Amino acid sequence: MIATQDIGGLEVFSCLPNGNTDKPALLFIHGAFAGGWMWTETFMPHFAAAGHPCYALSLRGHGGSQGHEQINWLSIADYVDDVRSVIDALAIDPVLLGHSMGGFVVQKYLERYPAPAAALLCSVPPQGLIAAQFHLMLQKPELFLEINRILAGNYTDTDTLRDALFAGEADPAMLAIWLGKMQNESQRAIWDMSMFNLPNLYHMHRPPMLIVGADQDALVPAFLVQTTAHTYGQPSHILHNMGHAITHEKEWPRAAAIIQTWLDGLRP
């Protein structure tokens, strides 16, 4: 069962296992244009059923959190502060799982704080967004222009959403729900991820890491996921016939299985 609470103006979802557990807590961090809601239908119930206390926050300016009126001025450092404040308030030491922009936030978090482990899922690479932006502009120029319209606060449609996030068939009802929940993103955060606040690799804590991508990802292509893995000296796990939204592709359990196997391997 998903519960929701307010922690210092931040919307925090939780899904807890039945009974006591010795498995580590998980904190899910969403990507750009989204909110903590993106984890509540699939990953959180799945991993809670496997015995992990699961939490997901909506970063400030996202979902049900405060700060929407300042969205364009919010930085990646602000998002890192949000993650830390939730961890402190919940008094947990969670494994961090970040998707897309959330994976970048995890990397910046590790500059300042340790973590038991971290999973980067279709994550913005430590080298930033520039290569991904050029790749999208060359491969799918119409989608590139539409995403820039969304960033400027303009409305899009379910066809664009499907092209951006999914490789396989996507349920039209689910797309309509996502379209109603998605929002504009902080332009300052986008600039941070492009070139102005990239991870300092020499100052990062280096916990066990999992690097996952998708071979049909239009936004963070597989070659950049492999670059991230190489940077951190880790193998990459590339999901076949899946797009950016690995949490909601019809075969999302394949992604969850990779994560679960990794989590199980963390235990002494």
Image: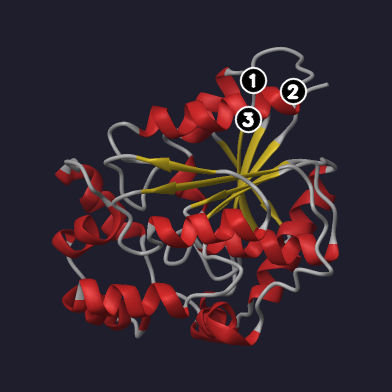
Mark 1 or 3, closer to the camera: 3
Q: Residues within 10 Å of mark 1 (few under 14, many from 20)?
A: some
- Which residue corresponds to mark 2? 23
Q: Say what secondary structure mark 3 lies in.
A: helix
Q: Earlier in the sequence, mark 1 or mark 3?
A: 1
Residue 9 picture location, percent across and down: 67, 63
* Residue 64 appearing in the image: no
The three-letter code of the residue at mark 2 reads Lys
Instruction: Identify the mark nearer the N-term, 3 or 2.
Output: 2
Q: Which numbered dot is residue 17?
A: 1
For badge 3, the amino acid type reads Trp
Task: Give, as a three-letter code, the residue at label 1.
Answer: Pro
Residue that mark 3 sits on? 262
Q: Residue 30: image x %, image y %?
A: 52, 55
Tell me: residue 258, above or below residue 145.
above
Dividing the picture into quadrants, the one containing residue 16 is top right
Q: Are marks 2 and 1 in contact (CB under 8 Å)?
A: yes
Residue 188 visible in the picture:
yes
Give the residue at x 14% y 60%: 159
Q: Locate residue 83, reporting x and y percent.
A: 71, 58
Q: Is residue 44 above or below residue 85?
A: above
Identified at 75% across, 67% down, the residue is 81
| Left or right: where 263 falls relative to 171 | right
Identify the residue shown where x is 68% and y is 52%: 233
Where is residue 158, by image quadrant?
A: bottom left
Q: Residue furthest top?
A: 19
Q: Nearer the viewer, mark 2 or mark 1?
A: 2
Q: Position of residue 157 (x, y in %)?
A: 17, 65
> Gap in Å between the C-alphas at discs 3 and 2?
13 Å
Identify the image quadrant of residue 134: bottom left
The C terminus lies in which quarter of the figure? Answer: top right
